[in-house]
């Protein structure tokens, strides 16, 4: 019994013990390396002495000899302090002549290496150099990142438990030391519940109206604003700059960029803020570091806690109804299909942070006869780093907590993979399940090679047909990008000028988090689409008409929009949001837009039975 008890105690302490042993072994390896290095150094000194004797020169004193000389000169010091000096100050001792010549050779050699530091990254602060004059390039382009990491600099929160603001750069330094803690615990608190659960129309209506009242107050009192940039002048300058960048006319491009920066501002009106982002993207493209700049933005997202994205989403839904309409349309269709289901399997190709599903779990818990067993299988892009599934695992733990709190039988599976790499076997579809396919703004991220007989986008659509879903819900933006840079730049400028105007018109200028939606949802896509080219382009959006033709050819039948769902979504948009938003159903799409321009659409499909499904 005593032996068994000791073994169990040892098992409970296994991790600390292994950690201690690993550290101990590491220290031993370091000691062995030091001893080996000392032996090698002694052998090297013997060879050097021999050559000095041949040359008739006196061999310079070694470090040990210098220590002896130093100790004789400082005879008043105790022997203990001499030993301490010998063990701890080796780096500060006068180096031997061969070592000095070695380091001098390195310095001379470094002169012949390129001195350009493309991104000028300061790893201590995890930010790019703030002084543009410090970053120099061979092509003399002043590549200004300065405050353009403003998402990472303005993402500050005041949590209910801690009223002090948290700088994200400080968080990143902390997170580099304890990088696994944030995702190992479920994150459920009042703030998540407030945003993700259905609190009733009155709750969110009050928040929306508070935004509207603040906007009206700012209009009356005149909140200080920067000089309003001339839309047409900035538009013209941006187009001219893109033409200069396209032909790599550095001098002309830099001259125009200077004019753009004088009129643009990250804190100005919509066109000024968009011009500020586009100027950075154009300059990155001109300097040839577009992909590096974009990759850095993506890499920094890994260490950002989900609470910041939640705050961004909360800000977005108070100003813009688009996400609420997507989720309302999707969840209402799912509930209609799951009315008599015992097992419901939702396959989500765009789970992101799982913001859509808490309200569905809540609605399923209220179904007559009890909720069905809910399975959610999510496929999300792998995160950079050593834990590609870190974020989707955190989403699963959070949804598990919600399902438990609402007594909904729940099972979750997260797959970190690109959509075109998924096989049907990985989804574990059972015959007794009602299968739902959910894809919100994700098919545009799948490559679509026009010349290929079986493009990655076609492969994903074939995979969806193999699932035989009861319903396939798709949401997409209504825009298209050309393969040619100049045409694509004009398309980007036209599209995002509407989005920036939309946010500028609906989020109060005095709100400290007003730029979060732009920097989360828009800036990375703008940087990638403008600064990158070829295989580095991450999205290939298409118009809704193009998607309609393509998916019908892939063997799907478009379902008519349910009038009750249309009515509910229209009431949602009319209930407090700016009256310049509009929503309408047309050709089996539920369309959303701003000032008469259609921006997005959501629809539902099902596989055609006569096509082998």
Image (spheres, rainbow, N blue to C red):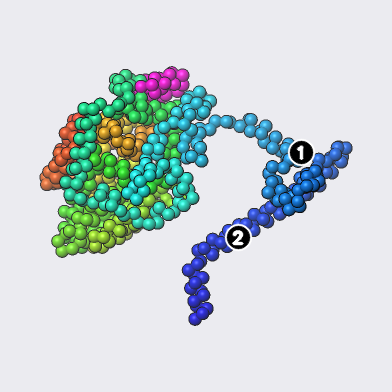
- Of 495 and 499, the residue lying toward us: 499
Report the residue at 51% width, 70% height from top: 10
Report the residue at 48% width, 33% height from top: 129
- Of 152 and 447, the residue lying toward us: 152
Residue 64, percent from left and from top? 77, 47
Q: Is the magenta stretch mostly helix, strand or loop?
A: helix
Give the image quarter of residue 406. Answer: bottom left
Query: In this picture, which residue range is highlighted in magenta?
Result: 238-263
Find numbered disc 1 in the image and state the secondary structure of the residue it sits on: helix
Residue 560, percent from left and from top? 15, 45
| Label 1 CA crowd tier, 10 Å (few <14, some 14–19, many 20+) | few
- Of 505 and 113, the residue lying toward us: 505
Mark drawn on residue 24: 2
Which residue bears the numbered disc 1? 97
Report the residue at 40% width, 56% height from top: 184
Residue 382, percent from left and from top? 40, 48
Residue 38, percent from left and from top? 73, 51
| Label 2 CA crowd tier, 10 Å (few <14, some 14–19, many 20+) | few
Report how far apart the C-alphas of labels 1 and 2 lie in the structure: 36 Å
> Relative to residue 98, is residue 479 drawn left or right?
left
């Amino acid at each position: 019994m005593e032996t068994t008890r000791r073994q169990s105690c040892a098992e409970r302490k296994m991790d600390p013990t292994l950690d201690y042993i690993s550290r101990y072994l590491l220290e031993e390896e370091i000691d062995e390396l030091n001893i080996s290095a000392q032996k090698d150094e002694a052998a090297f000194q013997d060879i050097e002495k021999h050559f000095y004797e041949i040359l008739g020169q006196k061999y310079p004193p070694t470090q040990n000899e210098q220590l002896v000389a130093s100790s004789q000169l400082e005879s008043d010091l105790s022997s203990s302090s001499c030993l301490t000096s010998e063990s701890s100050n080796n780096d500060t001792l006068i180096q031997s002549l061969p070592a000095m010549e070695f380091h001098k050779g390195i310095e001379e050699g470094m002169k012949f290496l390129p001195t350009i530091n493309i991104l000028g990254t300061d790893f201590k602060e995890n930010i790019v150099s703030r002084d543009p004059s410090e970053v120099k390039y061979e092509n003399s382009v002043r590549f200004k990142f300065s405050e353009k990491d403003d998402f990472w600099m303005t993402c500050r929160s005041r949590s209910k438990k801690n009223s002090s603001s948290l700088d994200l750069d400080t968080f990143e330094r902390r997170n580099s030391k304890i990088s696994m803690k944030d995702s190992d615990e479920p994150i459920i608190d009042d703030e998540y519940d407030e945003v993700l659960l259905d609190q009733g129309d009155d709750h969110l209506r009050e928040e929306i109206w508070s935004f509207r009242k603040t906007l009206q107050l700012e209009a009356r009192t005149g909140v200080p604003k920067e000089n309003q940039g001339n839309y047409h002048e900035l538009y013209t300058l941006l187009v001219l700059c893109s033409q200069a960048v396209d032909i790599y006319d550095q001098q002309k491009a830099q001259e125009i960029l200077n004019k753009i920066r004088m009129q643009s501002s990250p804190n100005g009106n919509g066109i000024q803020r968009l011009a500020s982002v586009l100027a950075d993207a154009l300059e990155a493209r001109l300097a040839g570091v577009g992909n590096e700049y974009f990759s850095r933005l993506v890499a920094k997202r890994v260490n950002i806690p989900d609470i910041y994205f939640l705050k961004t989403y909360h800000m977005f839904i108070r100003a813009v109804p688009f996400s609420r309409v997507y989720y309302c349309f999707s969840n209402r269709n799912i509930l209609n299909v799951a009315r008599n289901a015992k097992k419901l399997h939702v396959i989500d190709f765009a789970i992101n942070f799982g913001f859509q599903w808490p309200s569905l779990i809540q609605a399923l818990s209220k179904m007559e006869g009890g909720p069905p067993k809910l399975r959610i299988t999510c496929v999300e892009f792998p995160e950079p780093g050593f834990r590609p599934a870190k974020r989707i695992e955190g989403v699963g733990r959070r949804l598990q907590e919600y399902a438990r709190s609402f007594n909904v039988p729940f099972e979750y599976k997260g797959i970190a993979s690109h959509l075109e790499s998924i096989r049907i076997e990985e989804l574990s579809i059972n015959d007794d399940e009602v299968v739902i396919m959910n894809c919100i703004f994700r098919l545009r991220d799948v490559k679509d090679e026009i010349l290929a007989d079986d493009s990655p986008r076609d492969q994903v659509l074939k995979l969806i047909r193999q699932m035989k879903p009861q319903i396939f819900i798709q949401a997409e933006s209504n825009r298209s990008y050309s393969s040619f840079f100049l045409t694509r730049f004009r398309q980007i400028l036209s599209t995002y000028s509407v989005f920036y105007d939309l946010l500028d018109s609906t989020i109060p200028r005095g709100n400290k988090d007003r730029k979060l939606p732009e920097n989360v949802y828009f800036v990375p896509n703008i940087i990638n689409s403008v600064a990158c080219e070829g295989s580095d382009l991450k999205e290939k959006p298409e118009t809704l008409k193009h998607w309609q033709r393509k998916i019908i050819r892939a063997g799907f039948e478009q379902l008519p929009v349910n009038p009750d769902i249309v009515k509910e979504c229209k009431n949602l948009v009319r209930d407090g949001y700016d009256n310049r938003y509009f929503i309408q159903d047309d050709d089996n799409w539920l369309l959303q837009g701003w000032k008469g321009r259609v921006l997005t659409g959501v629809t539902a499909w099902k596989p055609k039975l006569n096509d082998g499904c």
